[in-house]
Amino acid sequence: MEMFLKWCRRSRITAPTQITRTSLESYQRYLFQYRKKNYQPLAVASQHARLAPLKVWFKWLAYRNYVSTDPAAELELPRVGYKLPSVLNKDEAERVLSQPNVGEPLGIRDP
């Protein structure tokens, strides 16, 4: 929230009622273009982590009638990619499957 509040101050936004969907999209672009001290961009997960609480907060503000409409209702959050887990290659899988002695009762699995 701190980054959002700093952005609001720079944008001369002083009240939640001044926030519109357009201003939230502007903040989202700001996050996309933001560079850290090492000049690296924010990761998609970091952008998502800064926007998701705003959606919840504005939903709550609208529910409590502090704002007339929820400006974040239709805001699309960046999609966080998921990495596939490391899996065994074919040779490693064959070695694992050949380990049990299926000729003995203890070696039989998943009949």
Image (cartoon, helix red, strand yellow):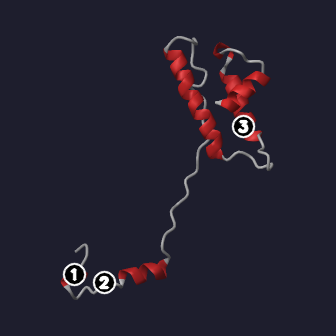
Q: Secondary structure at mark 3?
A: helix
Tell me the distance, in whole angstroms, between the alpha carbons under discs 1 and 2: 8 Å
Whichever of callouts 1 and 2 sits on the residue coming sooner in the sequence is 2
Where residue 8 sits, quadrant-wise, is top right
Whichever of callouts 3 and 2 sits on the residue coming sooner in the sequence is 3
Name the residue beneath numbered marker 1: 106
Q: Is residue 72 left or right of residue 107?
A: right
Quadrant in which the N terminus is drawn? top right
| Residue at screen point 65% across, 45% down | 44
Quadrant in which the C terminus is drawn? bottom left
Query: Seen from this angle, which residue lies furthest left?
Result: 105
Q: Nearer the viewer, residue 6 or 49?
A: 6
Residue 51, horizontal then vertical, whole percent: 62, 33
Contact between marks 3 and 2 (CB within 8 A): the answer is: no
Name the residue beneath numbered marker 3: 31
Total labels: the figure holds 3
Where residue 70 sits, quadrant-wise, is top right
Per the rendering, the mark at residue 100 is: 2
Q: Amino acid at mark 2?
A: Pro
Contact between marks 1 and 3 (CB within 8 A): the answer is: no
| Residue at screen point 25% across, 72% down | 110
